[in-house]
Amino acid sequence: MIEDAPLPEVDALTAPFWEATLRGELVMQRCAVETCRRWRFPPRPMCPWCQSMQSGWEQVSGRAAVWSFIVAHPPLLPAFSAMAPYPVVVVTLDEDPNLRMVGNLLARHDGPINEVDPATITIGERVRVVFRRAASDLALPSWVRDP
Amino acid sequence: MPNLLKDTTAIAGIGQTAFAKSLPMTELEMACVAIKAALADAGVAPAEVDGLASYTLEPFVEVEVGRNLGLGDVTFFSQVGYGGGAGCGVVGHAAMAVASGQANVAVAWRSRKRGAATSRPWAQVGERLTGAGQWSRPWGLLRPVDEIAMLARRYMHEYGATRDHLANVALASRAHANRNPAALMYDKPMTREQYHASRWVSEPLCLFDNCLETDGAVACVVVSAERAADLRQPPALIHAFGQGLNQQHQTMTNYHRDDPLLGPAWACSKALWRYADFQPADVKVAQIYDAFSPLIPLSLEGYGFCKRGEGGDFTNDGRLEWPDGALPVNTSGAGMSEAYVHGFNLIAEGVRQMRGTSTSQVDGADTCLVTSGEGVPTSALLLRRP
């Protein structure tokens, strides 16, 4: 847990996503129309491919690949300054190349965000989801190596 | 439909405050100073102004500008959103108002106090996050530089662009600023070694890949081309204008569409060149929005100066540098070395190039591209001499 880190508001649209994180599940919003069934992230009310407002949340495998990454150095928010330099990644989920998420690459489940040596990170490397508890109502999907 | 805008309006006046880390004026005061200077430059009385266009980020409304400057009855007012993407947009809105007859004299401006570290929006922690930031900031992707660095790393990976390409951008801007007494970096030369030795901010971007943070304001006056011909300054005709918000775009953290490196410049470019009488190869000078250095290669590609993936190589061989480069870019020093006024100083520099009064005047420059922020819904202008 990072003291005073900015956290997302859990609202009617995003509640299923964050509730799943408390169960250790990664779920994604998916169009409910049988002829469409496209995934979408970040969540939104309408499917941009078929304009339906009927959607559900389905568990995904939690397998992904690193799409890009940065290494953050100060000046940063006080909550993150003590961790710097730390890497942040964007990963692409196996289910759909357009499902990309920002996250942290951890050396171990519940490890700190600055434990992986950034010099060892490569674009394309395989990762799998873990969950880092950040508040009573949510855990942040994070990633560990899955070679 | 015929295009109402092509060469029918012109920027007839430009004005600005000093640029500094800290100015003893409020944003309203700076806006008034810049607008007054732009009207004086054009030779137009404040009472004649009947159109206003500004950024949604302006902290006060058109009413205050009118009350202070003694403007006449204003019959057109418009704002454009998305921060640095708005600059050419507000000028374009002013031009459309004049071209369509909704206003005769329109003023567009940006006034921004951002020199103080405490003024940076990313540093303000409030309640829980809503909007796009809720999917990035909790993991420590906090600042605009982090958001663009993520795209830059991917761009370098896909196309082989290097930090030396980014250095080419920073060094060209700095060399131009060293010729511009109004620039914050006027008396601070920079070498490639200094670039590479500077501290990281968000790898792969270092300190000198970032724009400055500045207090300052810039304004311009738009009138019909006919009227401009009778005013004090040589007019900079507005040849074309575009805005761009591309499909499945997410502002700054544009990681979720099929091809995240296709930024809003690509959509804007279509609108910009659609009615133009000339091509990118005919453009001899460009002012390209530079909050971060990777936006220059990305924009060069988006606006058609080279093919996809060639933006890095395009910066080689001094191509961006005055006086001998094939396309001198950011000839005032722009956001990285003159001042960061959300790109509005790039518009003023485009006008100076068309007047022949830039401190890095490009010989024979009869057209100029000016762009606004890439990575956010954006806008661009093609200026030309009459």
Image: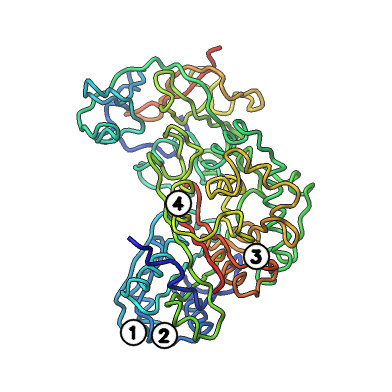
Which residue is rendered at x = 32% and y = 60% of the image?
B1
Q: Chain of mark 1?
A: B
- Amino acid carrying label 1: it is Gly
> Considering only order in the chain, which callout, 3 or 2, is on the residue closer to the N terminus?
2
Which mark is nearer the camera, 2 or 4? Answer: 4
Q: Position of residue B108 (x, y in %)?
A: 43, 71
Tell if the residue under mark 2 belongs to the same chain as the one under mark 4: yes
The label on residue B72 is: 1
Is label 4 in a helix, a strand or a loop? helix
Question: How far apart in space, not on screen, are marks 1 and 2 (Cα)?
Answer: 7 Å
The circle drawn on residue B332 is 3
Of A81 and B109, nearer the camera is B109
Element carrying mark 1: loop
Can you identify the residue that label 4 sits on?
Answer: B268
Specify the farthest residue to the top.
Answer: A147
Left or right of B108, for residue A74? right
**Marks 2,4: beta carbons within 8 A:** no
Q: Which class describes the residues within 10 Å of circle 2: few (<14), some (14-19), or many (20+)?
A: some
